[in-house]
Image: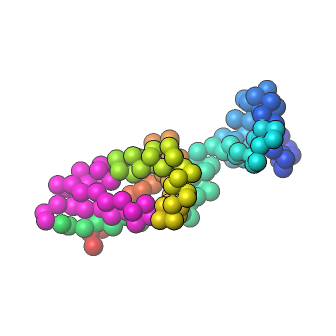
């Protein structure tokens, strides 16, 4: 890993040439800024596990409800609701809803960021996306301790 952190973005050409080194640096926690000529801002490459660490203070707080003999989950951070015959099926439904919302959001990120009622979801979307890449979506969304019925 280089001793000097590049404060200036790496050109896309240099990035391509040294992609293995930049990838290794990003995986080990050193953010790698990359920019194309005549672009309006750099992109930032960072390992998904390091991104989760950086977003650790941002937490999901699922709420559990019983409704007509079924278990419901409300996830206020993404304004998602799930329902199941039991806690396991409700959790599965919630995680599927989160996954689908992440895909939809990131497929049209500019539109979602432009929507006042959806803009605040973005950091949670990024956290859920990184967690999903690492196979940790359930742990990150539901937490180590399962939610308790309200």
Which residue does the image show at 80% across and 30% down from the upper left? 13
Measured as percent of width and height from the top left, residue 102 is found at 46, 48
Query: Can you say whether 13 is above or below 96 in the image?
Result: above
Residue 142, picture quadrant: bottom left
**Quadrant position of the N terminus in the picture:** top right
Which residue does the image show at 45% across and 54% down from the upper left? 140
Which residue does the image show at 36% across and 59% down from the upper left? 80
Measured as percent of width and height from the top left, residue 123 is found at 55, 58
- Left or right side of 128 for 80: left
Q: Nearer the viewer, residue 48 or 97?
A: 97
Residue 18 shows in the view = no
Measured as percent of width and height from the top left, residue 77 is found at 44, 64
Which residue does the image show at 70% across and 35% down from the upper left? 23
Determine the residue located farthest toward the bottom in the rendered image.
150
Determine the residue located farthest toward the left in the rendered image.
69
* Span shown in magenta: 68-95
- Left or right side of 76 for 87: left
Structure colour scheme: rainbow
């Amino acid at each position: 890993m280089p001793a000097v952190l590049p404060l200036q973005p790496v050109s896309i050409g240099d990035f391509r040439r040294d992609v293995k080194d930049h990838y290794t640096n990003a995986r080990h926690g050193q953010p790698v800024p990359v920019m194309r000529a005549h672009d309006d801002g750099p992109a930032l490459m960072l390992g998904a596990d390091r991104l989760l660490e950086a977003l650790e203070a941002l937490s999901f707080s699922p709420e559990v409800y019983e409704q007509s003999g079924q278990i419901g989950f409300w996830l206020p951070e993404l304004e998602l609701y799930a329902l199941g015959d039991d806690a396991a099926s409700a959790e599965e439904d919630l995680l599927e809803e989160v996954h689908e919302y992440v895909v939809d959001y990131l497929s049209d990120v500019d539109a979602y960021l432009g929507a006042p009622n959806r803009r605040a979801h973005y950091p949670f979307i990024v956290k859920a996306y990184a967690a999903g890449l690492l196979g940790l979506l359930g742990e990150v969304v539901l937490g180590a301790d399962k939610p308790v019925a309200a």
